Amino acid sequence: MAGRQIEFPEKQTHVKSFELAMLGVSVLFIVLVVIAIAVVGGGEVPSG
């Protein structure tokens, strides 16, 4: 693996919608993890 580098394109465009989508997915994942931990830990999670 030595000597190989990942070459990024010089022009890196930041798409706001894509960034917002990734942020939303990250937040949703964190929420799901917290809920899963609460369920496994026997916490009170309102269902229904």
Image (spheres, rainbow, N blue to C red):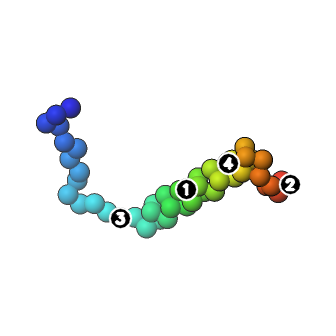
Task: Report, in whole angstroms, how far the alpha carbon at label 4 lies from the one at label 2.
Answer: 18 Å
Residue behind mark 1 = 25
Asked if one can make out residue 32 in the rendered structure from this viewpoint, the answer is no
* Residue at screen point 86% across, 54% down: 48
* Residue contact between numbered discs 3 and 2, judged by CB atoms under 8 Å: no
Q: Position of residue 38 (x, y in %)?
A: 72, 51
Task: Report, in whole angstroms, how far the alpha carbon at label 2 lies from the one at label 1.
Answer: 23 Å
Label 2, residues with CA under 10 Å away: few <14, some 14-19, many ≥20 = few
Residue behind mark 2 = 48
* Residue contact between numbered discs 2 and 1, judged by CB atoms under 8 Å: no
Residue behind mark 3 = 14
Q: Secondary structure at mark 1?
A: helix
Q: Secondary structure at mark 2?
A: loop
**What kind of residue is marked 3?**
His
Q: Earlier in the sequence, mark 1 or mark 3?
A: 3
Q: Earlier in the sequence, mark 4 or mark 2?
A: 4
Q: Secondary structure at mark 3?
A: loop
Task: Report, in whole angstroms, how far the alpha carbon at label 4 lies from the one at label 3.
Answer: 34 Å
Q: Earlier in the sequence, mark 3 or mark 2?
A: 3
Q: Residue furthest top?
A: 1
Instruction: Using the image, tell me which numbered label, if any, was put on residue 37.
Output: 4
**What kind of residue is marked 4?**
Ile
**What kind of residue is marked 2?**
Gly
Task: Report, in whole angstroms, how far the alpha carbon at label 3 lies from the one at label 2.
Answer: 39 Å
